[in-house]
Image (cartoon, rainbow, N blue to C red):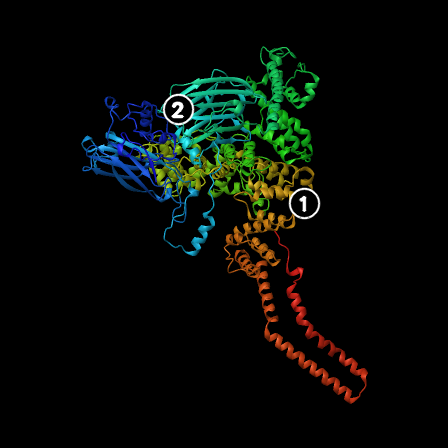
Amino acid sequence: MQRRGAGLGWPQQQQHQHPSPPTVGPRAAAMVPPSGGRPPGLGGRPACALLLLCYLNFVPSLGRPTSLTTSVIPKAERSMAYKDFIYFTVFEGNVRNVSEVSVEYLCSQSCVVNFEAVVSSEFRSSIPVYKKRWKNEKHLHTSRTQIVHVRFPSIMVYRDDYFIRHSISVSAVILRAWITHKYGGGDLNVKWEENLLHVVAKNYTLLKTVPPFERPFKDHQVCLEWNMDYIWNLRANKIPQCPLETDVVSLLDFPYASSGENTGIVKKFLRFQNRELEATRRQRMDYPVFTISLWLYLLRYCKANLCGILYFVDSNEMYGTPSVFLTEEGHLHIQMHLVKGEDLAVKTKFILPLKEWFRLDISFSGAQIVVTTSIGQDLKSHHNQTISFREDFHYNDTAGYFIIGGSRYVAGVEGFFGPLKYYRLRTLHPAQIFNPFLEKQLAEQIKLYYERCAEVQEIVSVFTSMGQPGGRSERTCELQNTYLDLKHRYESPSTCKTFPWEKDLKDKHPSLFQTMLEMDLMAVPRNSNEFIVEIGGRIFEKAVKRLASIEGLHQISSVVPFLMDSSCCGYHKASYYLTVFYETGLNVPRDQLQGMLYSLVGGQGSERLSSMNLGYKHYQGIDDYPLDWELSYAYYSNIAMKTPLDQHTLQGDQAYVEMIRLKDDEILKVQTKEDGDVFMWLKHEATRGNAAAQQRLAQMLFWGQQGVAKNPEAAIEWYAKGALETEDPALIYDYAIVLFKGQGVKKNRRLALELMKKAASKGLHQAVNGLGWYYHKFKKNYAKAAKHWLKAEEMGNPDASYNLGVLYLDGIFPGTPGRNQTLAGEYFHKAAQGGHIEGTLWCSLYYITGNLETFPRDPEKAVVWAKHVAEKNGYLGHVIRKGLNAYLEGSWHEALLYYVLAAETGIEVSQTNLAHICEERPDLAKRYLGVNCVWRYYNFSVFQIDAPSFAYLKMGDLYYYGHENQSQDLELSVQMYAQAALDGDSQGFFNLALLTEEGAIIPHHILDLLEINATIHSKNFSVTRELYERCWIHTNEETFSPCSLAWFYLHLRLLWGALLHSALIYFLGTFLLSVLIAWAVQYIQSISASRSSQTPARTTTDPAASSTSNPASSPARDASDQDQPTGMNNPEPQG
């Protein structure tokens, strides 16, 4: 038995009975009185008194340290010796389920004795788990002993078992007791916290805690079922490990091309799984400690007031800590959110370098910020600045999301982002930061590209200055007079060939100089940037003209220099052509590095096809691009936002994106042109007043559909004719919209409103929605707008659903105060399901940010929705249409070129069409393409969400037979056929059945997908029969199909096999054989008895001999035929 603790005064009769306490810590040991003598009071030993005061106020805490300890002893009475004391003895030093404690105390007057056990864990401190108090009014001035049985919770005493699932790890267990006088403020009814204010004597001691895996198991006196007990014992002795987690987050690993527009990369942090890291993060919300390190390559400073680099947006869609922007002068603008709710910003004194890779390191430590820029591979410090504040920042990196680049709030920088590391809980010096640029070759190529392009742009700038009034060579070739002005206007433009450039420079850029010399000097625009782009466009047109020739693909190697100069001039359609040439090896050596370079350059230049190419490669993680859905979303969302604007402007080379497959002969037959039969017939019917023909003709001309060139003016004429001459509500509505917006015709709001009301009165839901749009846009009458939109929404109009969402988002819905993003999101989602483009964009934004509860964060779904909108872009439709026209005209080179350009953007219909072309012309594909065309693009297509079933069948065939360098893979072949079967294709079921007949085993998870019960159909024969039945059900043929014939043949073989193996057949065969043998013996005996001539007998016995052998051998031969069917009965799977 061990005694611990000391009181304020010690009784003389027990001073020689104190055994030495165990070593439980320096603080407890210092409070034990020396043996063999009377312990001194507080006045005799000041050091001991100080230690006593320290341990009496001991409370474990994980918070900030306390700097002041208050004594409970009045100053005037510190030298007095009190008779009241309390100490206790613990019989067991460890924490037990029931720990027996002997409390010895003395009261000088009526008192209350208080006893409690306090526990501290890893995340919480000072948790009382046991309390007890009692009075002492009779036995005064006498030492008393009370035995207390302290019962601790099972979760801190026993190991985990079936009933105790989560035991806690205890860091400290404190037993403390104190005495209060009854008439000095102490009573049983007084709260524990208030009772501590009137203490006259108190004490404490520590109990030794036991780690969770050294504790005993508890006997629950309950028997588990044998299966539950067995399962629990399998994992009972496994020691759980804390998740390996770090505070370092890699936000970006691959270069990101920022176009300076309102799109960027969205990243979201989750809470730490490790409890220690999460506790540290929470403690530092008001004292942020973190570091940001990112690589940047800036092309120019911000055109607007601020451009986004990296910033945090909280759950209320407000800027948080940190927010780093670039100014128009090149400074850094750093903004923080303060604890008191305000915002504070600071601007650096230095400016960032241009057209140079540099690393920007920003470290936050409380109210101090250190900004460092380092240039070059050796990271020589370029600038360093330390900024201090007097305010505390609020920092919660999980209550919102981070944005790299632009967003709907601010445009991004123009340039490239490199690797970005984020240290969530550390402040590091730049020398301690590990953030290498992994793509060094690509970074170097980007730098070399812009150095080369600077030379090209300098040449064009010099040429521009010569063509401007006051330039060095202002019309030096001819004198300036009226006659020469007229001659210059109506004759071919004069050129000046005395430009001061060296011959090697001209040989380096021949296409550039040739194009500039062909341009009219007087027609040079004042803005040099516009002229540079115009030069690039003309060079590109020359290159495309060569590629459109009969042997156009053979000209690719010669037009590459043209495209490089065009790209340097800022015409980034050329950049995308170079991307495709290098990534596919289209008549040039395949070079993935150069393909990445020009793809990033085109994406930075906001080229639509380049951005889609980058988005698709990062979405699938192919062609050495890392899989990164957030990065993919940044590219796709940029084009998705431009798609509705492109459709409304009707400018540039655009066409309606039509999902036309080259395998579909019926659709190919209706493709036409202005002089085609289909168009002429529609025009004839429209002239006669056929409303359907008028509407279709107008749509074809307005959007450029079905092979007809886009002609908005002619389309509007048909809209007007149909609206004014017929009573068709659709034509009336279309013409009203044209009049409202003034697309190709002068605006006429009064007539448009009349037509809109007329169409709405005929029950057209688009017109009802249009009336709501009119009252919202022109009259600002939101009540009437909402009324019409609610009516149209009930009629199933997706535009009305979107418009209602806008009212809720803007907070102007009648009768609803404030914004309601939840309802807005619901209406946007409903509109998106109806195919509304803007509604789909909002849903993709909600999925990438995860700021709405109804839209949990799902980056993959966000990419899918943004990709769906981006693939409706008219510039992509123009490329697809040119490829289709070339295919219909038999121009194989041009068709292959444009379908390769479209397929590399990731649109599925072009990928399958390109694979089809490569199947039709394998010689063309092998000669010009550096990739396995059929395998590559069928394989790409099956990973699309809307992949057709024939693509799965084709990939199944390729996996089954093997293709060129690709080996056979029966398992993947089964998966492809099963996916085709899931899409309802009977050929998929048929091929699976053939595989099972060959002995292939279909995995259970595929059978589950096909809803085939593996327990019922446990044998291959049963599975085969079920697959043939499914094939027969899904076939579209009314007469006998291969599926039905195979099903009948399978059952016929089953019946024949059953007959051959039946007992009756064996009995009849034995009986017949016995009869034949008996007849043969009798016949031979009769012949021998008659002793007739043997020659005739021999001629008659030959058939008998053959007849005796055939019945015996027939069953064996039939059985062999059954066991080993011929190849004719088991055809190979066909796609």
Sequence-first tag of 1 and 2: 2
Whether residue 888 appears in this view of the structure is no
Which x, y percent locates residue 260?
50, 25
Disc nearest the viewer among 1 and 2: 2
Asked if labels 2 and 1 touch by Cβ distance under 8 angstroms, the answer is no
Name the foreground residue: 749 vs 1080: 1080
- Residue type, mark 1 in image: Glu
Residue that protrudes farthest toward the bottom in the picture: 1090
- Label 2 SS: loop
Q: How crowded is mark 1: few (under 14 residues within 10 Å), some or many (20 or more)?
A: few
Which x, y percent locates residue 488?
62, 16
Whether residue 494 appears in this view of the structure is yes
Q: In which quarter of the image is residue 204?
A: top left
Name the foreground residue: 488 vs 1122: 1122
- Label 1 SS: loop
Which x, y percent locates residue 119?
35, 37
Q: Name the residue under label 1.
A: 964
Q: Name the residue under label 2.
A: 393
Which x, y percent locates residue 110?
19, 34
Is 501 positioned to the left or the right of 187 in the image? Answer: right
Is 709 positioned to the left or the right of 736 in the image? Answer: right
